[in-house]
Image (cartoon, rainbow, N blue to C red):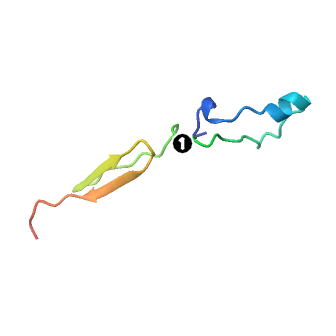
Amino acid sequence: MHFTSSDYKNDLKHRLLGTEAPKSYKPLTDTAVPSLNLPQVKKREGEEITGSKDGQVKVSIVSDGKV
């Protein structure tokens, strides 16, 4: 599970019909972004890892100027 409960849409259709939605039916909101149980990124020597709010990770090679 990578989403919080607020990331899922309210299932009004099945609630009003009095039926139960299939267990695999979990519609996400348009703004849902995975935020739970994310994979851990390990930093190696000479790398710089930066993240952003939209979940993208950037890995840069840091050089000390020597060739």
Q: Residue at x 90, y 32 (%)?
A: 19
Name which residue type carries label 1. Answer: Pro
Q: How many marks?
A: 1
Residue 61 falls left or right of residue 14: left
Above or below, 57 against 6 in this view is: below
Residue 67 falls left or right of residue 15: left
Crowding near the residue tagged with mark 1, few <14, some 14–19, many ≥20 C-alpha atoms within 10 Å:
few
Q: Residue at x 45, y 45 (%)?
A: 54
Residue 6 falls left or right of residue 46: right
Residue 63 falls left or right of residue 22: left
Task: Farthest residue to the bottom: give it.
Answer: 67
Task: Farthest residue to the left: give it.
Answer: 66
Above or below, 6 against 2 in this view is: above
Q: Based on the displayed image, in which of its 4 quarters is residue 14 positioned?
A: top right
What residue does disc 1 label?
A: 34
Residue 4: x and y, percent?
59, 32
Residue 33: x and y, percent?
54, 42
Residue 66: x and y, percent?
8, 66
Q: Residue at x 87, y 28 (%)?
A: 16
Q: Based on the displayed image, in which of its 4 quarters is residue 46 positioned?
A: bottom left
Q: Residue at x 38, y 44 (%)?
A: 52
Q: Quadrant of the C terminus?
A: bottom left
- Asked which secondary structure carries label 1, the reply is loop
Above or below, 37 against 15 in this view is: below
Q: Nearer the viewer, residue 42 or 18?
A: 18
Q: Quadrant of the N terminus?
A: top right
Residue 44: x and y, percent?
28, 54
